[in-house]
Image: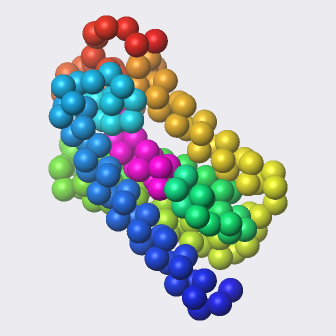
Amino acid sequence: MGRSARRRRLAWALGGFLFTAALGVLLHYLWGWTGENRIAAAFSAVNESVWEHMKLVFFPAFLFSMVEAWFQDAPGFLAARGLSVWVGTALVPVLYYTYTGVLGRDVMWADLAIFFLAAGAVFLLDLRLRRSGRLTSGWQQAAGLAALWLLALVFVLWTYRPPHLPLFLDPRTGLYGVPPGPAMF
């Protein structure tokens, strides 16, 4: 790969991180700003559960990935991005439960650091995976795309009908998912 192609990839990765970080912060507040609109709930945080904070990494990275896929015809893009988005999103609960298990409580600055680390991990891992050139087969591309859309579907579904597990519990209110209101599904 030439120097200009590497620079383009790096520029996309930096842009993706900045987009994900900025939009993720906005999505933390969007549900409240919209008067608790039940459609906005699908992709913004509706409470302080770890699950809802995972959405703040996933949806901006997902949106950016769909735009980037439109402009790029890079070998291995969908497979690498699908895997890296899953890993970055999974880092949120892994890091959160690790540090709160050690400290016995949560700390706001650590929560913010986890968000930015997870967003950065999405695009750094993507760069490494694509550089390796191992995820270029057709089935891997299809699996990467399917993985992204499956996770998007699960995030939406479990926002409205979350399992009653600690990952989905808002520690401040004791509620799961969107608070009771007019039925959406």
Q: Quadrant of residue 43?
A: top left
**Residue 163 lies in the magenta-colored region:** no
Q: Position of residue 112 (x, y in %)?
A: 25, 54
**In the drawing, does residue 154 fall left or right of residue 180?**
right
**In the drawing, does residue 48 fall left or right of residue 157?**
left
Q: Is residue 114 visible?
A: no
Q: Give above or below for 102 relative to 38.
A: below
Q: What colouring does the structure picture have? A: rainbow
Magenta extent: 52-64
Question: Of residues 94 and 155, which is closer to you in this image?
Answer: 155
Q: Quadrant of residue 70?
A: bottom right
Please state, as top left, top right, bottom left or bottom right, where the N terminus lies in the image.
bottom right
Please identify the residue farthest to the bottom as the structure is shown. Answer: 3
Please identify the residue farthest to the right as the structure is shown. Answer: 138
Residue located at (21% from left, 40% from top): 29
Q: Is residue 181 visible?
A: yes
Q: Give the tally of numbered discs.
A: 0
Q: Give above or below for 123 relative to 108.
A: below
Question: Of residues 63 and 114, which is closer to you in this image?
Answer: 63
Q: Quadrant of residue 49?
A: top left
**In the drawing, does residue 87 fall left or right of residue 97?**
right
Q: Position of residue 38 (x, y in %)?
A: 32, 22
Q: Main secondary structure of the magenta part?
A: helix
Residue located at (66% from left, 57% from top): 78
Q: Position of residue 9 (x, y in %)?
A: 55, 76
**Residue 53 lies in the magenta-colored region:** yes
Residue located at (34% from left, 41% from top): 53
